[in-house]
Image (cartoon, rainbow, N blue to C red):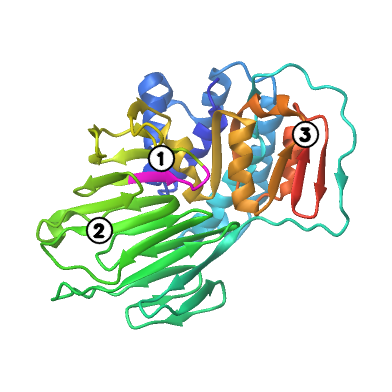
Amino acid sequence: MIDIFQIAKLKIKKSLKILSVSDKIQLDQFYNDYPFSKKLKIKKLIDKFEGYSAINKDKAWKSIETKIKEQKDKPVFVLFKKPWYKYAAAAILVGVLMMTYFFKESVFQDPVEITSPIVNANTVIVPGTDKATLTLEDGSVVTLEKGNSITTKNANSNGENIVYKDGKSKTDEIGFNYLTIPRGGQFHLVLADGTKVWLNSETQLKFPVSFVDGVVRKVELVYGEAYFEVSPSTSHKGSKFKVLNKSQEIEVLGTEFNVKAYKDEANIYTTLVQGKVSIKTELTKKILKPSEQSNLNLNTNGIQVSVVDVYSEISWKDGIFSFKGKPLKDIMKVISRWYDVEVIFENKNLESIKFKGTLEKNQSIDEILSIMKSYSINNYEIKNKTIILK
């Protein structure tokens, strides 16, 4: 089923000129499949595509129109002279659109009788935040979090990201730092060469504090998930960029890609957004094209390559969880890392139920579970920081 409200959201973002690379990929893919839709206005686009029994289209569109009408007399829509007004307007419209679309499609039978969830009154589970720990060359550890600005010899952090100075080393003796993201955290890093890295929950990256032009640039994804926007080799006297991880080595010239390599999983997934990368192990080497994903099985060291929905793989860095036919077991792994909770399937039959839809990462855990509960989860219990699905 077409996620038409996601497409409508992207069209709004495009009109406000705040479309990201991953957004553009998703919108272009839709236009390639349905060329006629490119010229349709948003309401006509929504009306054109049928099959949305899970929501009331007229009601949804009316809420959008109402919200726009309510805001017309406010400066946020009238004055677009300063950039932040654009973002405020986009946030309102995108928010309305997102509210109309959560888990519209699933592949299970009608839900069984629903009972009230059991929630410990003392339990408070909140979404993750920007936070990390930085281990310096001398072994000292610095806490990075909102409201805690720090400056080191090589970098500056405002508590929400850390930027390394563009200092080029003239020797081979380069120091390394470790950036560790806990469960319930995320962080953004700019390396000394200008490469941007988004780090997901439960992730650790080892990287040099500086680089030498002409010498291969190497970082190590010790574990977890990271999205890389690599500074091109042409800006560094041809220096290639490599990401090392367990049994594989990724080599790039200048590109954007995502690597997922969690400690509790037996597979490493590398998804290419744009550019070109090679995946190399002791046994084989694969070249990825945009929209392709490699799946390295750590038990066999074999690599499988397939075409995937890129947006679903990288939306996490933009504050969105996008699931496309994912089993509940895999979805709850993502939820457990972001909210720093444990999940127990008391009813094992729930593990294989598949969902399709979009969630915002700043939603409360109660909102997310309520959405799922309205479809297939008979009941759930939150006890301390453990979610029990029944």
Query: Which structural element holds mark 2?
Result: strand
Does the magenta-highlighted stretch encompass residue 270? Answer: no
Secondary element under disc 1, as helix, strand or loop, is: strand
Residue assigned mark 2 = 218
Residue at 43 percent across and 23 percent down: it is 37
Q: Quadrant of the C terminus?
A: top right
Give the camera-side residue of 387 and 87: 387
Looking at the picture, does residue 363 appear above or below residue 213? Answer: above
What residue does disc 1 label? Answer: 268
Magenta residues, dominant SS class: strand
Inspect the image, locate mark 3, and give the three-letter code of the amino acid beneath it.
Glu
Instruction: Decide: few, some or many residues near mark 3? Use Cα within 10 Å; few <14, some 14-19, many ≥20.
Output: few
How far from the left and from the top, in percent, is residue 89?
55, 52
* Residue at mark 3: 346
Q: Is residue 72 visible?
A: no
Q: Amino acid at mark 1?
A: Ile
Residue bounds of the magenta highlight: 257-264
